[in-house]
Image: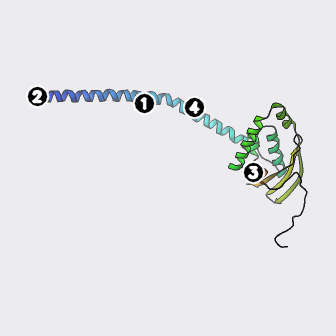
Amino acid sequence: MVSIVFYCGYVVFYLQIETLRKLFIKIQQRFFHYFATMKPIAIFSFLLFVITACNNSDKQVAAKSDSDLDAARNFLDAALKGNYKDASGYMLRDSTNIGYLNVTERSYQKLDAVKKDSLKNASLRFYDTMQVNDSTTITIFANSYRNDKDTLRIVKKNGQWLVDLKYLFEHDMDTTNYKQQTRIDTIHK
């Protein structure tokens, strides 16, 4: 009787081990299949990343300006032509400026073809330039299509002149009635 119980226990134990072995083989085959198909995808993704990274570095090197007005002109010209990727190369890279550039690009994309062509063919006019210090310049400009004066700040950072786009949206000077005036000090009257 003990031998029958022992034999039955052995059979149950053997069946459990055999079931676990088959399960392990299935899992092993699935993992092999998963990793065998993922390896080419991972290699392709890595190569695509490397090629893209190398391609972007060339464009940032090309976006250099010799002077403050050159940076403003390059930025505005690229934006008027709808090439916001190039325009961003002439811009001070911070989250606020990137956000404003994205909003401007979305607005440009909503324009009809006639208005886009008019902006592409527009020329830039610079009315006044105020040098705040050796690394900051403010310029008043307009384009020939809209002929609406506005103000742009250009800053020198790490030896490179870049447009600070947020100044265009956040400054408090009304450039439609701009006249160079000396400000009166109202505190010491």
Q: Residue at x 89, y 64 (%)?
A: 182
Residue underneath mark 4 = 44
Residue underneath mark 1 = 31
Front residue of 24/2: it is 2
Front residue of 14/110: it is 110
User: Amino acid type of disc 1?
Assistant: Phe
Mark found first going from the N terminus, 4 or 1: 1
Cβ–Cβ below 8 Å for labels 1 and 2? no
Q: Position of residue 174 (x, y in %)?
A: 84, 54
User: Amino acid type of disc 2?
Assistant: Ser
Task: Answer few, some or many: residues within 10 Å of disc 4's Cα (few below 14, many 20 plus, some between 14 and 19).
Answer: few
Q: Is residue 13 positioned above or below 141 on the image?
A: above
| Quadrant including the N terminus | top left
Q: Mark 4 and mark 1: span between their CA atoms?
A: 20 Å
Q: Mark 4 and mark 2: span between their CA atoms?
A: 61 Å
Kindly state the secondary structure of the residue where label 1 is placed. helix
Q: Position of residue 8 (x, y in %)?
A: 16, 27
Task: Answer few, some or many: residues within 10 Å of disc 3's Cα (few below 14, many 20 plus, some between 14 and 19).
Answer: some
Q: Position of residue 78 (x, y in %)?
A: 80, 40
Question: Can residue 152 be seen in the rendering of this structure?
Answer: yes
Residue underneath mark 3 = 166
Q: Position of residue 5 (x, y in %)?
A: 13, 29
Q: Mark 3 and mark 4: span between their CA atoms?
A: 39 Å
Return the mark for residue 3.
Answer: 2
Q: Which color scheme does this rendered protein use? A: rainbow
